[in-house]
Image (cartoon, rainbow, N blue to C red):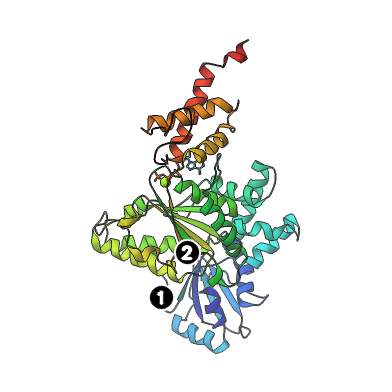
Amino acid sequence: MLEIALKARLPLITTTTRDPLATKQVLDHLAGRKDTRRSSGSLPTGKIPKGMVVYVVGQMALPENQTIEKLESHYKAHEVSVVVVNPVQKLPPNFYDAGEMPTPLPIVQRMVRKVVGVKAAPALMPALGGLTLKEVSWLIRIASATQGELTRETLTDARRSAFHAPAGLQQINSEMGPYLPEPVLKKWAKQELPFFMNGDDPRLRPKGLLLGGEPGTGKTMAAKWIADQLSIPAYRLHCGSLFDKYIGETEKAMTQALAQVDRDEPCVLLLDEVEKIFGGSSGPTGDSITKNVLGELLWWLQEHTTRVLTIMTTNAQDDLPKELYRPGRIDETMTFRGVGYNSALALAEHIAASYTPALTGVRVHKAVYALFESEGHKLRSAGTTHWEGNPRVTQAAVSAAVVKAVKQKMLKPSKSKIH
Ligand SMILES: Nc1ncnc2c1ncn2[C@@H]1O[C@H](COP(=O)(O)OP(=O)(O)OP(=O)(O)O)[C@@H](O)[C@H]1O
Ligand SMILES: [Mg+2]
């Protein structure tokens, strides 16, 4: 909005920023000039070069014998724009409110290039969406000091530990333990994710997924895995803090959160357990609010062209309004159904290998076998591992069975080790 206002040469503009020291750089860039000028306090009068951009930070004062209307027409006549940044007083309606000052990516890239060189800079950019120049320089220092090297991963990690997530959102830790993605998810990621980062045509960009399935089948982990594959920040929408008792506030919170992820692109937006907000017709705070919030989300899912990948998870897909997951809003619905015996074994072996000392061989087999038995499944014939009716267990149960077996091994080391 600020860029449009400057291009349109609006005479009086106001904007806010978390980084007032970068104002000149940003305004120069947005206005396509090099001579943006700061005026200390009072609005400029007298002769001002045509097309000039002048800014005031904080307190704004009217010069003596002037009215805002007179100044406005004076600026208009000279095609001058005066921008009041972070105003401390309430401004008259003559000012166009341009909202938050953006930090144009070319400026950020220039700064990052100075630190890491021209070649390495582009790969780091996806970790820096929505940050001001000051914040980017802090983040680079923090990541270098705490993580030793500057990569997209270390920047994303440092961002999570050292920066506040935007209001209503929580940056989630996408560091993964041992994880085996579902084949259908892996296939989707391989096909679609390259279009998320590189696709210049927004129509080709994946928008997101709805992941269904019973508790413990790895829906939340799948969302983290996707963020990890992309090495970009992942935010969880705080559904709890979304609902507000004041009329209109809930919708506003949703709108603000969505505007925020648009600003912080590229990123993953996780809407975990969406049925808790939109399940059934009666949301937690009554029908109309739920419907309005749903409306906001539906509109955004359809219309946004930013690089925001939305992953929704649910235990109760049947309770969700169908328009939430129709094509055009998200790309695909996947239902996770847990794992059969052979996949459970492969998963258990994968998880077991991550412990020190690793759990191997017979103990892993025994643990998985015991798990299937404890869930009431019966063998088709004795001495085999063919179960009646091809039963499935959840990944969470497999993970828990491995933990149990690891603990048992620690308490009772095998005889071969004792002798
Ligand atoms: N594909 C997987 N590979 C390895 N471990 C997994 C996998 N899927 C799930 N797990 C294990 O199961 C646990 C639960 O997974 P997760 O929290 O993603 O389940 P969920 O489907 O989101 O459950 P809920 O519906 O209760 O939120 C994980 O902490 C992990 O230990
Ligand atoms: Mg979950």
Q: Which residue is mark 2?
A: 331
Of 307 and 229, which appears nearest the observer? 229
Name the residue at 44% across, 62% down.
258
* Percent coordinates x, y for residue 19 in the rendering: 57, 60
The amino acid marked with disc number 2 is Asp
Of 8 and 174, which appears nearest the observer? 174
- Asked if residue 15 can be seen in this view, the reply is yes
Q: Which residue is mark 1?
A: 92
Above or below: residue 163 compared with residue 350: below
Name the residue at 50% across, 60% down.
309
* Percent coordinates x, y for residue 8 in the rendering: 54, 83
Using a 10 Å C-alpha cutoff, classify the residue at mark 2 as few (fewer than 14 neighbours), some (14 to 19) or many (20 or more): some
Above or below: residue 20 compared with residue 65: above
Of 165 and 188, which appears nearest the observer? 188
Q: Quick one: which residue is furthest to the top in this view?
A: 419
* Percent coordinates x, y for residue 314 in the rendering: 38, 52
* Label located before the other in sequence (1 or 2): 1
Give yes or no for contact between labels 1 and 2 (Cβ–Cβ under 8 Å).
no
Secondary structure found at label 2: loop
Q: Is residue 192 toward the left or the right of residue 288 in the image?
A: right
